[in-house]
Image (spheres, rainbow, N blue to C red):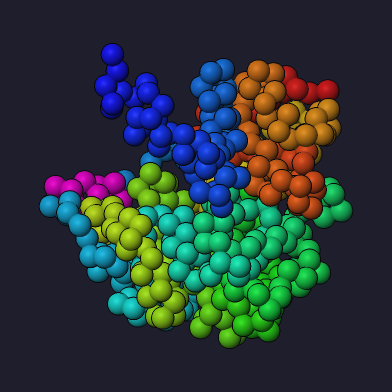
Amino acid sequence: MSSSLDPGRADAPGAVGAVARAARGPAVVRRMRGFGPTVFAEMTALALRTGAVNLGQGFPDADGPPSLLEDAVAAVRGGRNQYPPGTGAPELLTAVAEHQRRWYGLDLDPGTQVLVTAGATEAVAAAVLALVEPGEEVVVLEPAYDSYTAVVALAGGVQRSVPLVPAGGDVRAGFRLDRSALRAAFSPRTRLVLLNTPHNPTGTVLDAADLAEVARLAVEHDALVLTDEVYEHLVFDGARHVPLATLPGMAERTLTASSAGKTFSVTGWKVGWITGPAELVAAVRTVKQFLTYVNAGPFQPAVATALALPDDFFTGLAADLARRRDLLVEGLRAAGFAVDVPRGTYFAVADARPLGWDDGVAACRALPERAGVVAVPVAAFCEPGSAAAEAVRPLVRFTFCKSDAVLHEAVERLQVLRP
């Protein structure tokens, strides 16, 4: 006989709760119901199942500079294993401020204008959650790093997307910002512009005219700007990364996020930072302290030292990536893809239509079996049904932050696709 607490009975407390939950619908909050497992997880699983070379997910397959790794080991052995200060290790705060002065001429108070975060992703999330009220609008270039749309939704904001798509529909002509669409995206409800340059997934480095137009519109509409600059040192062919905060009138309204992951090939360390006006950094800190609180205690002093490495480390990194970019781009062209030559990041975008695919998702699902290589569809970085999603539908993204051996293997495999 069942007891009164038998979960099999319809009147048992657990059963009643289950019925109530079922009546409410999915467990996740309504504003996040459009989000689920990403295409990146699907592609990684395909790579594992098929033994394909994974050029989909953007992480290096080699560690960063030896001195950085040795400094991290020394910090662990030296007892830097407990909570660091909530704003970040003092030496890292100072190092970030010095980095901004050294490379861009920005003067920051490390005590009030720099905050260490769990990667740039947390910096962006904490900033959006701190600054955007429900119903306020956030201008985002699309395609966009997938966390942007999610965190705008978490904040209850409204995303206004601006296409950054191939000029004239030809990926070989590079990606162009639609400035008329940019102007149309601003309104009296615009609170924030979320800008990523160098840009993931397209590899675009926004030029001076694009940046000037963003700045002009931000000032005109009294909007704040949040820039994601994690690829700041990964620029090629004479391209120059210009932080928006360096433009006239922008330092007082711009927050800048970056991290150690891309520059030093330590993406798993999740050491990031955000800089800007003291009152805006304080707002971000108010939210950030209730997210991760602190992180990466022994890695923070190691990153601080690495930020002071000589210029030839940073220029050498970019030169080596440019060489690997060329290796991949030439291989993709030889296989039959039309390819953009990126001027930044470590991603190259290719058009699969010359090989018979007009849908990048279908191409990426077929590539592991057909050629033994994994990529990701660029449309996965867009809101479904948007103008940008349609424009990039046939495009796929490959990463070139891999070893020469891995890239040569991938290029060789891809030649099976040649028409």
**Residue placed most toward the observer, 192 or 363:** 192
Query: Residue at left 68%, top 49%?
Result: 382
Q: Above or below — where is 271 with respect to 276?
A: above
Q: Where is residue 343 shown, x and y percent of the image? A: 65, 55
Q: Taken as a whole, is the magenta stretch helix, strand or loop?
A: helix
**Residue 34 vs residue 128: left or right?**
right
- Which residue reaches farthest right? 168
- The quarter in which the C terminus is drawn is top right
Q: Above or below — where is 333 with respect to 279?
A: above
Q: Where is residue 155 shown, x and y percent of the image? A: 52, 61
Residue 37 visible:
yes
Q: Which picture quadrant has residue 136? A: bottom right
Query: Residue at left 28%, top 27%?
Result: 5
Q: Where is residue 14 shown, x and y percent of the image? A: 35, 32
**Residue placed most toward the observer, 125 or 96:** 125
Magenta region: which residues? 67-78
Query: Residue at left 46%, top 39%?
Result: 20
**Residue placed most toward the observer, 246 or 327:** 246
Please state the total of marks drawn on the protein image. Answer: 0
Magenta span contains residue 76: yes
- The quarter in which the N terminus is drawn is top left
Q: Above or below — where is 381 with respect to 220?
A: above
Q: Where is residue 161 shown, x and y percent of the image? A: 70, 60
